[in-house]
Structures are given as C-alpha cells and as structure tokens.
Image: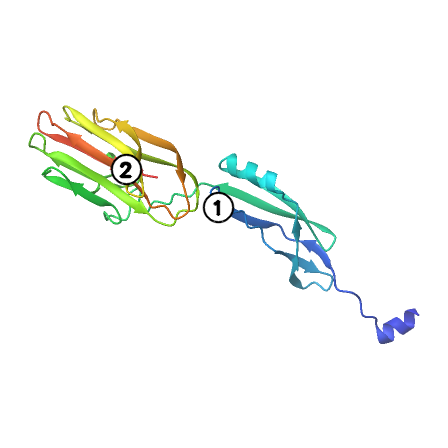
Amino acid sequence: SVFSLLREGREATLKADALDDAFLECDIHGAIELPETVDAVMSDNSLQQVPVTWELDAQQEEQMHRAGPASYEIRGQAQGLEALCHVNMIELNYLENGDFETGSQEPWTVTERGKADQIYPENKVGDSLDGKWHMHFWSAAENSVDFSLEQTVEDLPAGTYKYAVSIMGGDGGETEIFAYVKLDGEIVATSPLEITVWDSWDTAWIRGIAVQEGQSVTVGISVKCQGAGNGAWGKIDGAM
C-alpha cells in the first residue's frame, strides 16, 4: 500500500488547518455586522475564505451597544476550528469639520443677528482647543456680537446621541450663550455656556438626544454679547 501510494498518490479532503482572527470597527449606534467568512490556511497551504458561525445573541449585542465605546472578542466556529473576531465599538462623530481643521467654515452656517466686525475660521494654535484652527469672532461695538453657528446632519441612524461644543473668550459683558439641538427644525435641548478670560474653555454637553429614522438633526451654538472694554471676542472649537 505504501509503494502504491507513492506511485499513484491519494486525493485528500481539503480542510482548514488554521484561522486568521477577524477585526471589525462598529459604531455604537449602528448594527453589528460580523463577517460571513474568515481567512483560513488550508491543508494544501493555500489561503481561502471559509464560512463562519458566530456566537453572538441579541442580548449580548444590545449590551455592547449600551456599554459605550469598548473592545470585545466574539468567538465562533469555522470548519471545526474556533474563530475569533475582535470588535471595537466606537462613537462616530457625525459632524463634518467639527474642529474647523479644513480651514473652511463649510458645512457650518453662520446666521448674523447683529453686525459683528469679524466671524471667520482662524489659524492660530494658541487660541485653539485642539489643532490649529477654530471659529473666531470679535466686534468693538456694543451689542454687535449676536449670531448662531450651526450644522444640519441628515440620514442619521435611529438612536440616542450626544452633542458637545466648546467656547472661550472675554470682554463679553452681559452674555447669552448656549449650545442647542434641533430636531426637524425645532429646538429640543439647550445647554448654557460662558466666556470669561483667554484660554478658559467652557464645554457644553447635551446628552440623550433621541433621533428617529428620517429625522433632520441640527446642532449649533448661539452667541450674544453686550460687550465690555474693547469689545467682545471669542473662539469656538471642538464640536462633536
């Protein structure tokens, strides 16, 4: 039999000898879509993709969404071997240019209610919360700083979200500054902010924003300053 096998050989069933780990990054607000196949090193040393069955039930998936950003290991089976998927649950920032690092105002919209001397993106590292850019405002005349800065996000997956934005500045006098969230054009939540002195950043957080499928979401900051001294000024940064 041995000499016969040497002469004629025998066809063996191709099977997986080892599996590569799978890696997945998933938004905590989105569905967890585990891969249907994993890479396998076969018995003939070839690399193929083989079907896999994961051990993830609905209760575990719900817990992964509710726990916030974290990393998990999901186990499964593929051709009799144990498979492993490393799932990194992250919180995506659905805002574009939230740190103004593009150097442009887009896609933010400024609505002026006063006549401020300056409202524009500024490149100045020492005046930024992070990076180099931020939104700058300044005006010398009393009651001339009065504007809103906002961005609308369409087609958000249904879920619960949070919004944050930061501001610093000075010479504000009497102020009315707040972050806000609109759903379908109506303000549903606000959070107060203030400016005091240079490099003293104030951050507003609005949590528990329940978004339904198809709703339009607008986030922004409203800034109104009476002004004192040489005029009100400030920097806006870190929207997420």
User: Furthest residue to the left?
Assistant: 141
Residue 120 seen: no
Percent of width and height locating residue 126: 24, 35
User: Furthest residue to the bottom?
Assistant: 7
Residue 175 drawn above or below residue 82: above
- Mark 1 or 2: in front is 1
User: In the rendered image, which quarter is residue 207 located in?
Assistant: top left
Percent of width and height locating residue 82: 70, 48
Q: Quick check: 23 left or right of 150?
A: right
Q: Quick check: 215 left or right of 46?
A: left
Residue drawn 26% across and 28% down? 193
Q: Secondary structure at mark 2?
A: strand
> What amino acid is at disc 1?
Gly
Residue 31 seen: yes
Mark 2: few, some, or many residues within 10 Å (few <14, many ≥20)?
Answer: many
> What amino acid is at disc 2?
Asp
Determine whether label 1 and label 2 are within 8 Å by CB: no
Q: Secondary structure at mark 1?
A: loop
- Residue beneath disc 1: 30
Percent of width and height locating residue 101: 29, 45
Mark closer to the chain start, 1 or 2: 1
Q: How far apart are labels 1 and 2 at the CA level?
A: 27 Å
Residue drawn 60% across and 42% down? 58
Residue drawn 7% across and 32% down? 140
User: In the rendered image, which quarter is residue 186 located in?
Assistant: top left
- Residue beneath disc 2: 237
The C terminus lies in quadrant: top left
User: In the rendered image, which quarter is residue 1 located in?
Assistant: bottom right
235 vs 177, nearest the viewer: 177
Percent of width and height locating residue 78: 69, 54
